[in-house]
Amino acid sequence: MSGHSKWATTKYRKGAQDAARAKVFAKLIRQIEVAAREGGSDMTANAGLRTMYAKARDASVPIDTIERAIKRGSGELEGVRYESISYEGYAPDGVAVIVECLSDNRNRTGAEIRNLFSRNGGTMAEPGAVSWQFERKGVIAVPRTFEEERVLEVVMESGAEDLTDEDERWLVTSSPSDLVAVRTALEGAGLEPGASELTMVATSTVEVASDSEAKRVLRLVEALEDHDDVQNVYANFDIPDEIMAAYAG
């Protein structure tokens, strides 16, 4: 889930940590298969696969599991063929939502995503209705243990666009094509980057100041994220930290 104030890491889950981890693994493995199918199994020539490999390792997916996923994607092993599909819609309060899926059955997935929107106070929209409010970016987290000046020097020389302060980490933003180069530069400088990924960043946000409306928005996003075919959910909400903390609790 990606909103305005926090980047794609704060999860509003209650219990079942092992089950949640297994679901994350399954989604990452599916993304690796698709990246290998679309660009080949050679990571030196397939930037998308390199990005997904790093993301999976950041999440502690075992190397042999990743390698099997690459072989399934490249055709060396038999596997299911997944299709990339995006859906757009609105959460309560007019919050724009993009849902990225990998599915082996477009009709089933579409019907189920539409049902989740409807049951949780949202509405599906036509393609392009909300995507203009987002930009595709590369994002890398760097621990705050490193000085801002040092991080800034390295990332700007490697093609990054911005460096922001987000609680206990620095957040580096780049164009999608520069993500691998920026991460490589950080690693080469000994700055030990954390999670990195291609994500959608909102160009404008919707303030949701009401506790009741914020809960409705977060429930819809959480319901979408729990669907097995959903890989990413992006929403342009701006919810106060105290309401986010209360919901998490």
Image (cartoon, rainbow, N blue to C red):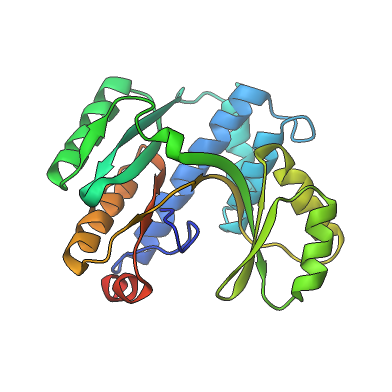
Quadrant in which residue 125 is drawn: top left
Q: Residue at x 15, y 39 (%)?
A: 118
Is residue 107 visible to us here?
A: yes
Quarter of the picture containing the C terminus is bottom left
Q: Is residue 119 left or right of residue 54?
A: left
The x, y position of residue 43, in whole percent, is: 74, 35
Relative to 185, residue 147 above or below = below
Q: Is residue 117 left or right of residue 34?
A: left
The foreground one among 201 and 189 is: 201
The foreground one among 247 and 239 is: 239
Relative to 138, residue 108 above or below = above
Q: Residue at x 67, y 42 (%)?
A: 175
Relative to 72, residue 156 above or below = below
The x, y position of residue 11, in whole percent, is: 39, 62
Q: Is residue 216 left or right of residue 238?
A: left
Quadrant in which residue 211 is drawn: bottom left
Total count of labels? 0
Q: Residue at x 36, y 25 (%)?
A: 127
Q: Is residue 189 left or right of residue 163?
A: right
Q: Residue at x 76, y 76 (%)?
A: 147
The x, y position of residue 236, in whole percent, is: 39, 50
